[in-house]
Image (cartoon, rainbow, N blue to C red):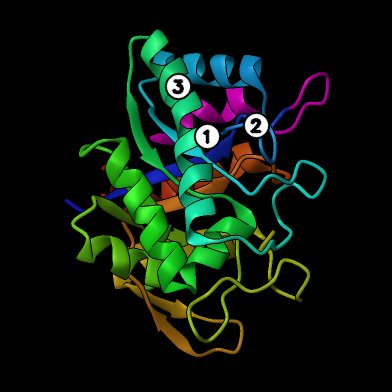
Amino acid sequence: MRTIDLNCDMGESYGAWKMGADADIMPFISSANIACGFHAGDPATIRKTVRLAVDHGVAIGAHPSLPDLQGFGRRVMKITAQDLYDLVVYQAGAVEAFARAAGAKLHHVKCHGALYNMAANDDALSEAMARAVRDLGSDVFLYCLSGSRSLRKANEMKVKTAAEVFADRGYSDDGTLAPRDKPGGMIEDRKKSVAQALAMVEAGRFPALSGKLIEVKADTLCLHGDQAGAVPFAKAIRAAFAEKGIRIAAP
């Protein structure tokens, strides 16, 4: 039976400001990427999100970012490989501590926003990211973009990986995510998103925005908890996978 992980970016509220429907979407996913306070999130939000994950049997992941609360971690910054290593270890350590306090453990790391995309196209940053995850523990997975330098570098370094794909994002011809503000960069039609998810998981190929077919390895599929209609989309994709006999579980 084909297995796919459904991961979701979560814990992105901050103080009195709320984002996403974490409690509503948690029952439908298998792994959670929890914001660490640098692009969103705060100690109380991390604690509450970890508790939700534990209660639903969802794998706990850290979602480290560039230090960019105002820009939600989506603005590119010039950093060194050592900067990236320090950012990942520091932020993942916070989530790991809350997981341990809840009687659980850190399962994976998935970088957020600009940090994720920067590493996907840079060997030095990819190496630093993989090294950080390796140093967090031999059982910790690194979630990174399917077909990216990050995935190749982590595999070379024998770090556990999960190749990530996105059903609600359009892709460029080189297999990278199209900019969010580009027409088609965000897929908001549920049927189109489900169709793209099935193509990625079943066939391992799907059309980029240009129509060019892109081949991918799909170990984990990202659902964005802050997207409008995230819960109905999660329900729809689970139903489509169930119909196809695709099992949902964390790696």
- Tell me: residue 140, above or below residue 173: above
Q: Residue at x 26, y 35 (%)?
A: 137
Which comes sooner in the sequence, label 3 or label 2? 2
For the point 56% across and 75% down, the residue is: 171
As for residue 28 lying within the magenta part, the answer is yes
**Disc 1 and disc 2 in contact, CB within 8 angstroms:** yes
The CA distance from mark 1 to mark 2 is 8 Å
Q: Amino acid at mark 1?
A: Gln
Secondary structure at badge 2 equals: loop
Q: Earlier in the sequence, mark 1 or mark 2?
A: 2
Which of the numbered marks, if any, corresponds to residue 37? 2
Q: Earlier in the sequence, mark 1 or mark 3?
A: 3
Are there few (<14), some (14-19), or many (20+) residues within 10 Å of tag 3? many
Front one among 209 and 122 = 122
The stretch of residues the image draws in magenta is 14-32
In the rendered image, is residue 242 in sight? no
Give the residue pinned by disc 3: 53
Compared to residue 192, the image places residue 96 above or below, namely above
Q: Which picture quadrant has residue 19?
A: top right
Q: Where is mark 1, residue-wise?
A: 91
Dot 1 lies on which element? helix
As measured in the structure, the alpha-carbon distance from the residue carrying label 3 to the one carrying label 2 is 18 Å
Image coordinates of residue 118 in percent, x first then y, are 56, 66
Labels in figure, total: 3
Q: Nearer the viewer, residue 233 or 29?
A: 29
Q: Position of residue 123 (x, y in %)?
A: 41, 72
Residue 52 point in image, percent of width and height:
50, 17
The foreground one among 66 and 247 is: 66
Judged left or right of residue 81, residue 4 is left
Q: CA distance from mark 1 to mark 3?
A: 18 Å
Q: Are marks 1 and 3 in contact (CB under 8 Å)?
A: no
Crowding at dot 1, Cα within 10 Å, few <14 / some 14-19 / many 20+, comes out as some
